[in-house]
Image (cartoon, rainbow, N blue to C red):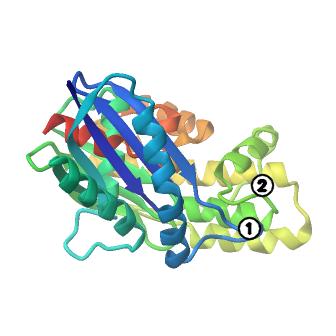
Amino acid sequence: MTRCYLGIDTSCYTTSVAIFSEAGHLVAEARKLLTVKAGGRGLAQSEMVFQHSRNLPPLLEQALTSIQDERVLAAIGVSAYPRPLPDSYMPAFLVGEGYAKALACMQNSRLYRISHQENHILAGIWSAGGPAGNNFLAVHVSGGTTEIVRVSKTSPMSLERLGGSSDLHAGQFIDRVGVAMRLPFPAGPHLEKLAAQGHDNPLLLPVAARGLQISFSGPESHVMRLLPKNPDFAALAAGVEICVAEALYKMIREAIGQTGLEEVLMVGGVMSNSFIRQYVSKKLTAERAKLYFPQREFSSDNAVGAAYFASIQ
């Protein structure tokens, strides 16, 4: 028998499972987006819990049956709360944690509870092959988080928030604009496709960035004032991408200047956007920063970080 390591993540909009082998390879992965009604801008926590409870059993079955040889479940990692803070809580994560506890008890497996943010960072480290240093910056940009943190690879890993959005998160900004332009939710991939047609003549938006703090409520209000004038949606989508990318660039540049840390890991669903990746990378590498991007499929919500964590303990 060989040992394997299971990861589970039940975030706001994705149910995810992943399995690592004893050799440290990702051998199985399955995930499913939660369903949001057309025109909706999100889900209530009760609806998230319901959909995770429905999605998780078949995803676990899919991942576990895809492993051909006989394996023993040595450890389970699970995203049990949003951030590594004492009062961090969200009902959606109770679904994954409950399944993880039950499986650990039945299989006599070790159980590791980590935060959703740590899961993202660990998935990024695994997929991007770095940063290699013991201290680096991580930028977590999604629909529920827009933060820059200082990471120390201590045991346990230590995260210190340095800055981020003071109001809307980058993903929220993209989703709200996308839904207002009648794009499906979550709007990120659809807005990216639309924006590709508008970058020759983008409709530029105000960028609100001061020090380590950025804001997207002002740019969102600006967009909503433009929409009744029937602007070019492709040019507007391109402007949204530029606004997000420039705000992130300014925040990261400030953090590098304040901390002296030049290795930066970029994680979260928004960082799967090719234009934003390229924009930030081009400007910061010109200033001698070293950026690490996970593969696009491991930027968005997944359980790989939790499985990876369980495998290295």
Which residue is the site of mark 2? 236
Whether residue 18 is visible, yes or no, is yes
The front one of 69 and 125 is: 69
Task: Please tell me how crowded label 2 is: few (under 14), some (14-19), or many (20+) other residues with Cα within 10 Å.
Answer: many
Disc 1/disc 2 C-alpha distance (Å): 8 Å
Farthest residue, direction left? 155
* Above or below for 206 versus 133: below
In the image, taking residue 128 as reference, residue 215 lies left or right, namely right
SS at badge 2: helix
**Badge 1 amino acid:** Val
The residue that appears at 80% across and 49% down in the rendered structure is 235
Q: Please tell me which of labels 1 and 2 falls first in the chain.
A: 1
Identity of the residue drawn at 72% across and 50% down = 191
Q: Secondary structure at mark 1?
A: helix
Residue 312 sits in quarter: top left
Q: Which mark is residue 223?
A: 1
Q: Quadrant of residue 309?
A: top left
Residue 167 in the image: state x and y as whole percent: 49, 74
**Picture quadrant of residue 186:** bottom right
Instruction: Decide if residue 95 is on the left or right side of residue 192.
Output: left
C-beta proximity under 8 Å, tags 1 and 2: yes
Categorize mark 1 by other alpha carbons within 10 Å: few (<14), some (14-19), many (20+).
Answer: many
Taking depth in this image into account, of 56 and 197 the one nearest to the observer is 56
The amino acid at mark 2 is Leu
